[in-house]
Image (cartoon, rainbow, N blue to C red):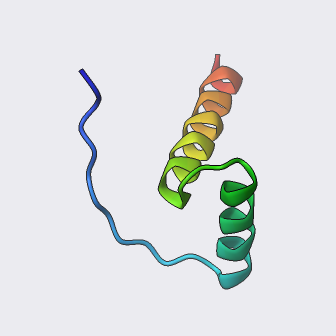
Amino acid sequence: MKPLKEKISITVDGDLLEKARAAAEADDRSLSQFINIALRAYLAALEKNDN
């Protein structure tokens, strides 16, 4: 079963949003998918550094 998704609203710097959109397009993903992957990778790195 897929994990449940929740809608959120965030404010992002314009330059960061442009880069994220470009990276998502280059990776043939939606912006939402790209942000999920990036956030998971960042949080995994934080967890790894804490151990």
Vertical placement of 38 versus 20: above or below? above
Vertical placement of 7 versus 28: above or below? below
Provide residue 51's location: percent of width, then percent of height: 64, 16
Residue for point 66% across, 21% down: 48
In the image, is 34 to the left or to the right of 11? right
Q: Residue furthest bottom?
A: 14
In the image, is 10 to the left or to the right of 5? right
The quarter of the picture where residue 17 lies is: bottom right
Q: Residue furthest front?
A: 28
Closer-to-camera residue (51/35):
35
The quarter of the picture where residue 42 lies is: top right
Closer-to-camera residue (22/9):
22
In the image, is 10 to the left or to the right of 22? left
Residue for point 26% across, 51% down: 6
Provide residue 30's location: percent of width, then percent of height: 53, 55
Looking at the image, how many numbered discs can be counted on the residues? Answer: 0
Closer-to-camera residue (30/12):
30
The quarter of the picture where residue 3 lies is: top left
Provide residue 31's location: percent of width, then percent of height: 55, 60
Residue for point 57% across, 76% down: 12
Quarter of the image that includes the N terminus = top left
Vertical placement of 12 versus 40: above or below? below
